[in-house]
Structure formats: structure tokens, C-alpha cells
Image: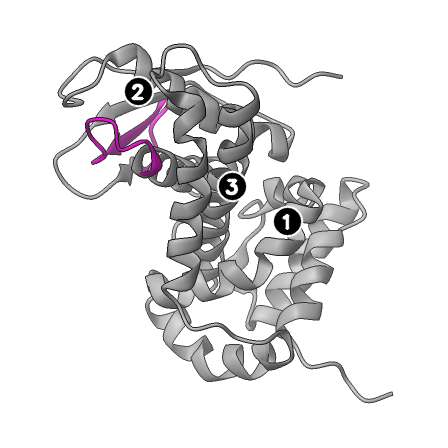
């Protein structure tokens, strides 16, 4: 069954040296890519507005309200900021506000931003939105922007991810927003999600159980798996995360 069209609107305001139609086309493109990968749209309309501070999505509000700091024709910033905040909405961020594993949600949202930037590079090349002047020529910049973000954090070989997580987990559980650590986790997962975007489907279940009862991150992945299995899903994504970030036990 085809996925319904999202109800995403961009509000008039100070978007700088661009048109509302162009900014709206970029926002709608982000929504199409990310919601298409998730297999669903948000459960309520999303209103996107220009903000003066850091990008922000309001808690406990329906319709959802997202403020962006991107301006003018910095389309990469629009895409990065909006995809990150929209991902919070799609993973049910305000169903449970505080638990020690929120760092993983932040990392998934960083992953979503990188994923969307790369997909937009393809989308703008093959199907440039007519509202965005020079969209086809701009297309490669999305992928370049994604690479610059990925290159800004230390590369961790796959074999070293368990040690990386063990060494940083306490810091992540204390301060769940740490852009360097969140991005490092996101980069570690990126190729898998690019190769198989159906992995996003399992992420719609995040925050739908009492994650504060999960004593460890391994328990958190177990709870995610259990919740998915009750909905007849195969629970492939939590298994992937476990395979990436935990050392395999000796037989």
C-alpha cells in the first residue's frame, strides 16, 4: 500500500534571501525521503518555522512545531536540520522524555540527517524540484556536506566499535547530546542503512515502551526486539546494532 502524503507545511517568515516556495520544496523533499524510508508519516501535521536559536522541536505539541536556523539558500543546512528534527518525531521522542538510552535516539537522528543528505543528492539530480533554482546543479553538494560531517569525527573500525561504546557509554548516558559521539555512532551505522533502507522500519517502535526500566543498553535492545516481535516484525535493526556495537561472545 503506498504511503500517504505528509502534512508538512512551512510557515511564512524570515527565511532570508530565498522564496517560501523554494524553502518549502526542500523541506517537502526531506519529508518524502525520510518518511518514505520509515514507511509512515508523522501522526499529526508538522509546521516548520524560522527560529533565532538552535533548531528545535517542541515537546508535547500537536501539530508538531519545528524551528530551523537555516536561512537563504543554504539547502544543506535546511536538509540536515529538518531531517534530524523530523526523525525525533518519527521515533516518538515525546512519548518518554527521560531515560539513559536517549543518546541512541540522538545518534539515530544524526544517522537520519546523513542518510537524507545522501539520498537528496540523488533525488535532486534525477528529479530536481522546479521551485529550487539550479536544483540539479546543487545536487552534489548534499553528498559533500554529508561527507564533511562524517569526516569531522574520528573513524572507528567496525572491529573497534565494541571498545568504543564501552569507553564512551557512561558519558553518553549522562549527556545524551554529544555531537561528536552521536555522529560517530551514526557514521558506524550509515552504510547499512544506505544499503537497506528498510532498516528504518524498525525505528518506528523506539520510545513505545518504558525504556527507563532498561538497566543497560543491551537490555534496551532486547526491549526493542520484544516490542517489535509483538507487532509481527522480524526485528532486524536491533540485531544489527547489537552486532555492530557488542563484542561477539565466545561459543
Label 1, secondary structure: give it: helix
- In this image, 82 relative to 200: left or right? left
Q: Residue at x 44, y 20 (%)?
A: 28
Residue 240 at what x, y percent from top left?
A: 70, 61
Which circle marks residue 118 in the picture?
Answer: 3
Which circle marks residue 55 in the picture?
Answer: none
Crowd class of label 3 (few under 14; some 14 to 19; many from 20; radius 10 Å): many
Q: Is residue 100 at least partly visible in the picture?
A: no
Q: Are marks 2 and 3 in contact (CB under 8 Å)?
A: no
Q: Is residue 195 at least partly visible in the picture?
A: yes
**Label located before the other in sequence (1 or 3):** 3
Q: Is residue 60 magenta?
A: yes
**Label located before the other in sequence (1 or 2):** 2
Which circle marks residue 23 in the picture?
Answer: 2
Give the spatial CA distance, label 1 vs label 3. 11 Å
Q: Look at the picture and state if 17 lies above or below 173.
A: above
Crowd class of label 2 (few under 14; some 14 to 19; many from 20; radius 10 Å): many
Q: Which residue is mark 1?
A: 193
Amino acid at each position: 500500500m503506498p504511503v500517504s502524503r505528509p502534512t508538512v507545511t512551512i510557515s511564512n517568515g524570515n527565511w532570508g534571501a530565498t522564496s517560501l516556495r523554494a524553502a518549502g520544496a526542500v523541506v517537502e523533499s526531506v519529508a518524502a525521503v525520510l518518511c518514505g524510508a520509515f514507511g509512515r508519516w508523522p501522526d499529526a501535521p508538522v509546521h516548520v518555522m524560522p527560529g533565532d536559536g538552535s533548531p528545535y522541536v517542541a515537546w508535547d505539541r500537536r501539530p508538531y512545531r519545528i524551528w530551523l536556523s537555516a536561512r537563504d539558500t543554504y539547502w544543506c543546512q535546511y536538509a540536515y536540520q529538518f531531517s534530524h528534527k523530523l526523525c525525533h518525531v518519527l521515533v516518538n521522542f515525546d512519548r518518554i522524555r527521560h531515560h539513559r538510552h536517549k543518546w541512541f535516539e540522538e545518534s539515530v537522528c544524526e544517522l537520519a540527517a546523513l542518510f537524507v543528505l545522501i539520498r537528496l543528492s540523488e533525488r535532486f539530480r534525477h528529479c530536481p524540484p522546479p521551485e529550487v533554482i539550479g536544483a540539479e546543479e546543487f545536487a552534489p553538494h548534499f553528498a559533500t556536506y554529508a561527507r564533511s560531517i562524517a569526516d569531522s569525527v574520528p573513524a572507528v573500525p567496525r572491529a573497534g566499535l565494541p571498545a568504543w561504546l564501552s569507553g564512551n557509554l557512561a558519558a553518553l548516558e549522562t549527556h545524551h547530546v554529544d555531537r561528536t559521539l552521536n555522529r560517530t555512532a551514526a557514521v558506524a551505522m550509515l552504510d547499512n542503512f544506505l544499503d537497506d533502507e528498510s532498516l528504518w522500519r524498525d525505528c518506528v517502535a523506539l520510545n513505545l515502551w518504558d525504556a527507563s526500566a532498561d538497566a543497560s543498553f543491551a537490555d534496551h535492545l532486547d526491549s526493542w526486539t520484544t516490542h517489535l516481535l509483538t507487532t509481527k516484525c522480524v526485528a532486524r535493526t536491533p540485531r544489527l546494532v547489537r552486532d555492530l556495537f557488542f563484542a561477539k561472545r565466545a561459543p
